[in-house]
Amino acid sequence: MKKLLLVMLAAGIVLLIVNFVLPSNDFKEVPVQLEVSAYDYANEEFEETFVIDDQQEIEDFTASLNKANHKNGSYELSRQPDYSIVMLYNNGSIDTLRLWLDFDTDLDLFNSDKTDGHYRLKNDGAREVILEILE
């Protein structure tokens, strides 16, 4: 009985350490540049791309992304994303995000080429930071 209790205690400690040491979302590395395109619903196409290379804005953007909750699975999306954001990294890799504003009541949605599933971002301070940077 003592042995079982000791094993369960050790497993619990390991799980706690893993949860606190490992980051919760996949946006660990801060990109060096963002290429942003907004979708023009009137013309049914993405507008011309503009570049964001201000490091503080990019760090704020990445920090806001990390506040989202990742959900496995997929959604049936009936409209184009409001924004397409290409994130360029120092090592030459890229990741493309697609952002749907007001996907649901008080909820935005985005996905990434590098991860499965979607991220749900509540309409709070993180959303305001992202919109301020993108507009």
Image: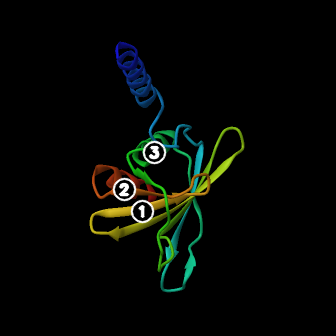
Identified at 34% across, 69% down, the residue is 102
- List the residue tagged with mark 2: 121
Mark 2 touches mark 3? (CB < 8 Å): no
Relative to residue 40, is residue 134 depicted above or below? above
Chain-order first, disc 2 or disc 3: 3
Residue closest to the far right: 92
The quadrant in which the N terminus is found is top left
SS type, badge 3: helix
Identified at 51% across, 76% down, the residue is 80
What is the x, y in percent for residue 70? 44, 51
The quadrant in which the C terminus is found is bottom left
What is the x, y in percent for residue 78? 47, 80
SS type, badge 2: strand
What is the x, y in percent for residue 15? 42, 28
- List the residue tagged with mark 3: 57
Res. 109 mark:
1
Mark 2 touches mark 1? (CB < 8 Å): yes
Crowding at mark 3 (Cα within 10 Å: few <14, some 14-19, many 20+)? some
Left or right of 33 on screen, residue 109? left
Crowding at mark 2 (Cα within 10 Å: few <14, some 14-19, many 20+)? many
Identify the amino acid type marked 1.
Leu
Q: Nearer the viewer, mark 1 or mark 3?
A: 1
Given residues 94 and 75, the one toward you in this image is 75
Given residues 130 and 115, the one toward you in this image is 115
Left or right of 110 on screen, residue 132? left
Chain-order first, disc 2 or disc 1: 1
Identify the amino acid type marked 2.
Leu
Relative to residue 60, is residue 102 depicted above or below? below
Mark 1 touches mark 3? (CB < 8 Å): no
